Image (spheres, rainbow, N blue to C red):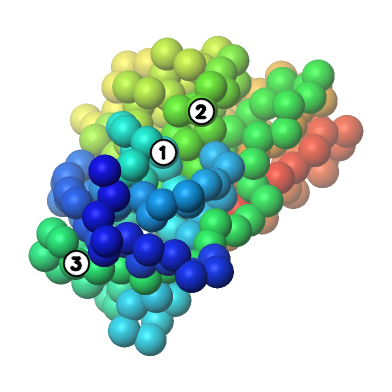
């Protein structure tokens, strides 16, 4: 059921927060009411409008059709993300969207998904809508930041946690280093469709590696910050 709090005007919508779940000390999921007739493609984002500030967030389908999920890191020095981490359940949120072209484009080339941190969100959306058989490199500091692992690992052909934290935080089967180190040292040559989401520096570095090692590949990217 969708209450009157969720309504749309053009591609501007109003929703409200139903649930907040903390996954680590600074990262949480927000479950939102899905406005009526709001549709999106996995990998797309919305732009939240809060106190005169605009911030983009990747959309993840909710557990039921009338819900949407956002995966958010509360940035200590940030404006919108700390607000979203604290505001009461039931708070109304205005947003525009969906927008973006970062969607799954099936081809004969193997799909290689590379995320840092919350960059896993668009891939969780793709996975929830049926994508499978991909290689996933997820770069985080600690094991507990491998968000949506339960969803992603069974659907992946190969799931590679890349951990940059202290050695004690690394699982025996994870790669101790950055996603770009893994790509350089361990990835077999070939033609791939690379999907990159997260930090700008990671995306720039992967593009450089692709130019040199996988020149016939395609790259799709979503820069978060
Ligand atoms: C296309 C797109 C999709 C995005 N999707 C998501 C998403 O699904 N989840 C999400 O948490 N954020 C996402 N972001 C980032 C988000 O829009 C905000 O920038 C973020 O929430 C910080 O906003 P703020 O107002 O709290 O801090 P700001 O004052 O805007 O930023 C402060 C600093 O925080 C850092 N930062 C921003 N985002 C992150 C992050 N996710 N993790 C670590 N450090 C960060 C940057 O260095 C930035 O300079 C996305 C951004 C874009 C452009």
* Whether residue 156 is visible: yes
**For ligand 1, which image quadrant applies?**
bottom left
- Tag 1 secondary structure: strand
Mark 1 = which residue?
Answer: 61
Q: Residue 36's spot in the image, x, y percent?
A: 41, 52
Disc 3 packing (10 Å; few <14; some 14–19; many ≥20): few
Disc 2 packing (10 Å; few <14; some 14–19; many ≥20): few
Name which residue lies at 19% across and 51% down: 18
Mark 2 = which residue?
Answer: 129
Q: Residue 7's spot in the image, x, y percent?
A: 37, 63
Q: In the image shown, does 14 or 104 lie closer to the viewer?
A: 14
Whether tag 2 and tag 1 are in contact, CB under 8 A, the answer is yes
Name which residue lies at 32% across and 17% down: 172
Mark 3 = which residue?
Answer: 91
Which circle's residue, 1 or 3, is located before the other in the chain? Answer: 1
Q: Residue 19's spot in the image, x, y percent?
A: 17, 49
């Amino acid at each position: 059921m969708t209450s009157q709090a969720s309504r749309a005007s053009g591609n501007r919508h109003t929703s409200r927060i139903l649930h907040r779940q903390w996954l680590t000390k600074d990262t949480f999921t927000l479950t939102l009411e899905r406005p009526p007739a709001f549709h999106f493609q996995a990998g797309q984002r919305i732009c939240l409008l809060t106190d005169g500030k605009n911030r983009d967030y990747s959309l993840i389908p909710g557990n039921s059709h009338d819900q949407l999920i956002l995966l958010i890191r509360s940035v200590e020095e940030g404006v919108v993300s700390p607000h979203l981490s604290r505001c009461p359940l039931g708070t109304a949120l205005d947003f525009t969207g969906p927008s973006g072209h970062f969607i799954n484009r099936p081809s004969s080339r193997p799909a290689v998904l590379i995320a840092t941190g919350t960059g896993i969100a668009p891939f969780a959306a793709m996975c929830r809508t049926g994508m499978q058989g991909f290689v996933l490199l997820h770069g985080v500091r600690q094991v507990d930041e491998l968000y949506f692992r339960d969803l992603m690992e069974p659907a992946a052909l190969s799931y590679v946690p890349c951990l940059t934290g202290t050695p004690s935080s690394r699982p025996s089967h994870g790669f101790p280093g950055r996603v770009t180190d893994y790509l350089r040292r361990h990835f077999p040559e070939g033609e791939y469709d690379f999907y990159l989401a997260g930090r700008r520096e990671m995306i720039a570095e992967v593009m450089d590696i692709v130019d040199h090692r996988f020149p016939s590949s395609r790259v799709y990217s979503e820069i978060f910050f």
